[in-house]
Image (spheres, helix red, strand yellow):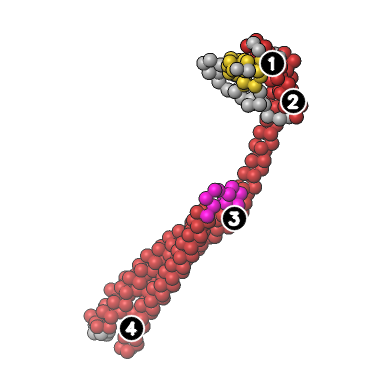
Amino acid sequence: MTQYYWPANLTKSPAGWVTSLVDWPNIATVEATPQESVASAVETLSLQISDRIRDDATIPIPSELKPGQIQIPADALTSAKLDAYVKKQNEKHLRNAFQIEQANRERRSIYLSEFRINLEPVERLRGQADDAAVKFASIALNSSYILNGGALVALPAILQFTENGTIDPGRIATSVWFFVAGIAFAAITNFLAFHSVMQAGEGHNYEIAARAIDVRIAHYPPDDIQIHQADSALSRDSSKKKLGSATTISRFGVTSYILSILSFLFGVCIIVRSLSATA
C-alpha cells in the first residue's frame, strides 16, 4: 500500500496551534498542542479524500515540500482507498487515451480520403493536359519542320531550273524566305507550347494547394483560420491567372503554327506557279 502525504504549515496563533494544508485551502485545524493539531489535520484530510473518492471528484496532487513545512499523511484506510482510486483513474485515462487515439485515426483516415478525392482529379487533369499538349506540340512541330525543312532540302534540285533560266531566281529567293519563315514560326510555336504547358502546370499546382488548404481547414480548423482562408483564395486566384495565361499563350502558339504552315504553302505555291509559267 502506498502512503500519501500532503505538505502543511504548522504555526502558533493566539487561538492555538494551526495546521493548514497547502493543497487543501479548506483544511485548517486549530488545537491546543501541535500533536493534537496534526492529528486533527490527518482526520480531516482523510475525510475530505474519502468524500472526493465517493463523488469521483478531483484530488489535489501534493506539491513539493518546502523548508519549514511538515507532511500530513492520509490514514491507512484512506490510503488503501486512494490506491484503488488511482488505479481506477489510470485505467480510465488509458481507456480515454485509447478512444482519443482511435478517434484521431478515424479522423486522419477521413481527412486523407477526402484529401485524395479533392486533389486526385486536379492532378489527373494536370497530367492529361501535359501529355496532350506535349503530344500535340510534338506532332505539329515535327510536321512543320519536315515540311519547311524538306522544302529547303529540295531547293538545290529546283535550282537546276534556274541555271537553265527556267525559273526566275527572284522567285526562288522569295520561296526560300517563306520556308525559312516557316521554320522560324515552328520554333516560336515550340517555345509557346512549352511555355503554355508550364503556365498550366503552375495553375494546377496552385489549385491543388488551395484544395489542400480547404480540406485541412475543414478537418483541423486552425486558430488563425482567416489567414488560411486568405491563402486558399490567393492560391485559387493565382491558379485562374496562370490557366488564363496558358490559354492565351496556346492561342498564340496555334496562330504561329498556322503561319508556319501558310509559309510552307506560299513557298510551294511560288515554285509551282513558276514551274507552270515556264511549262
Type of amino acid at the residue the image marks with label 3: Asn
**Residue 262 in the image: above or below residue 215:** below
Q: Disc 3 designates what residue?
A: 118
> Where does the image place residue 31, in percent across and percent down from the top left?
66, 15
Q: Which residues are magenta?
A: 215-226
> Where does the image place residue 84, in percent across and percent down from the top left?
73, 21
Q: Disc 4 designates what residue?
A: 270
Q: Disc 1 designates what residue?
A: 40
Q: Along the polypeptide, which appears first: circle 4 or circle 3?
A: 3
Question: Closer to the camera: disc 4 or disc 1?
Answer: 1
Q: Along the polypeptide, which appears first: circle 1 or circle 2?
A: 1
Circles 1, 3 touching at the beta carbon (< 8 Å): no
Cα separation between marks 4 and 1 = 121 Å
**Residue 125 in the image: above or below residue 149:** above
> Where does the image place residue 176, in percent across and percent down from the top left?
29, 76
**Residue beneath the point at 58% across and 15% down:** 12
SS for dot 1: helix
Report if residue 137 is visible in the image: no
Cα separation between marks 4 and 2 = 109 Å
Cα separation between marks 4 and 3 = 56 Å
The local crowd at label 1, few if under 14, some if 14 to 19, many if 20 or more residues have their Cα within 10 Å, is some
